[in-house]
Amino acid sequence: MTDILAAVLAACDRWPDAPAMTLGRRTLSYAQLRSRVLGVAGALAERGLQPGDRVLFSVRPGLDGISLALGIIAASGTVVFADPGAGEAMFRARAALAAPRWVAAESLLYAASAGALRGIARRRGLELPDYASVVPGALHLHAGPWLPGVPNGSIPVRTLLAEHGGGTLAGDPSGEALIIFTSGTTSHPKAVVHSRSSLGTGLADFADRVGFVAGERVLTDQLMVGIPALISGAHWRLPPAGADPGAKPAAYLDLLPRADVLFAVPAALDAMLRMLEREPAKTPTLRALLIGGAPVLRPLLERVRRQLPGTRVLAIYGMTEILPVAIADATEKLDWTEPGDLVGELMSTVDARIEEGELVVAGPGLALGYLGQPPLNELHTGDLALIDGRRLVLSGRSKDMFIRGTTNVYPGLYEPVIAGIPGVAEAAMVGVPDEVGDDAIVLVIVPGAGFDEAAVRRALPGLIDAAVMPDRIQLMDALPRAGRSSKLDRAALTAIVAGSA
């Protein structure tokens, strides 16, 4: 078992003068990172943070945000990642389930969720909760300058960061440290709970398998990639706020000359490769490309091999509950000619078995469980698979699920909720995949009496997670069904929807 904070601090002791993290023109050395993390831990303890306190966290991944998150965990607090883009109703439901004692947010979020700026945010499609009041009686931290809307008494994050080295690593590494919300509804939000040990065990195994090199530059905004890089003594380079390789690939490509390793999800990588086809002079020289967050399919790998011939390419298979499960080299995947999708060799810390065709995983890197539910001893992944020695091959899904971006979408969670909207007789959600494995979400509705599509669209943000909002709505007279039980024939429905796109 590896304590994630102990591993990061050990790296700080081993490479004190080396660059640890860079964002723009700012760089922190490993010694500075250690001082910041322990300083935040000590400062928060002095200001009343108790072991086990949960902190609703909406601070962007930057030098200050990462230092703050690690400091909270070092003080034996729990970081509860809270996405402000989830929609107000979902955000409030998640906050209620997590029951945090603290709120940490960008000062701009406090300002934009209250007063005149709240209306501006709404007109731009951002439904924010009032950060100052969403958790009654909370203690507050704000990142950035004080702005109207920041609660009286809120502690500036810059003050905490200025108190260097005053704390020590506290608490039980097996206790909760990080809560990550996944798909769910406003009535039943769902969150994965990790400990320092479960995170550290999985991510240290990941670092070993990837083979990060001390001093090499790793470009990512993902904690689950950046932290293993830090453990290995690498230089974590963070993209600037708003840099989106999928939406703005040209700007992102300008960052690549200063990177040796890049992490990308398939959809974003697809956008960058298309841009490189038009501007081949921008083709980077990377030691390694890490692809994860969604299925990594053969057509994408073939393009990567063609456009980045000297780069080692690794495809990562995992899930929020246990990351990663397996890693495959692109050559290994492309050479695979048997049925199914070879996702690589199981990680050394992962135990796996097949139960009625379904992959079941366990091990010390498995999350503690789901918030508010019993402990998790093993995970039924929903993936149909076979295990050849330690090699894992996927062959489909045993459960109704598809992937949109990096979100696993379980339509059965949402269809009953949507069907309860007045005027909706029946509802079904399907994913229509593209060539890189990303799914567009189509909501199919059988209209009933008084159906009003505009009213349905208005109702959806208050009922379902923003990450699963449909890309389009399609009306049908009836849903296709099969078998004696007249169960929804989801495969047939997907084929119909794909054919009408």
Image (tube, rainbow, N blue to C red):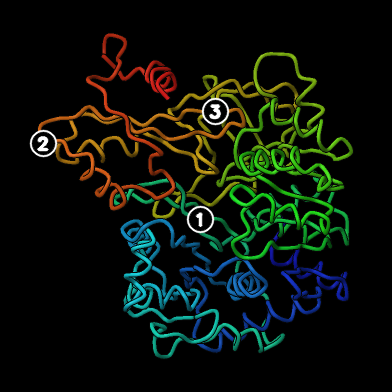
Q: How far apart in space, not on screen, are marks 1 and 2 (Cα)?
A: 39 Å
Residue tagged by mark 3? 383
Q: Residues within 10 Å of mark 3 (few under 14, many from 20)?
A: some
SS at mark 3 in the image? strand
Q: Earlier in the sequence, mark 1 or mark 2?
A: 1
Residue tagged by mark 1? 180
Determine whether 177 is above or below 142 in the image.
above
Nearer the observer: mark 3 or 2; the answer is 2
Residue 135 locus on image (x, y percent)? 35, 73
Given the current orientation, which residue lies at the most extreme top position?
Answer: 484
* Lateral position of residue 373 relative to residue 220, left or right: left
Residue at the (38%, 46%) spot, across then down: 184
Three-letter amino acid code at disc 3?
A: Asp
Residue tagged by mark 2? 450
Disc on res. 74? none
Asked which quadrant contains residue 94, the reply is bottom left
Residue 375 locus on image (x, y percent)? 47, 49
Front one among 382 and 315: 315
Q: Earlier in the sequence, mark 1 or mark 3?
A: 1
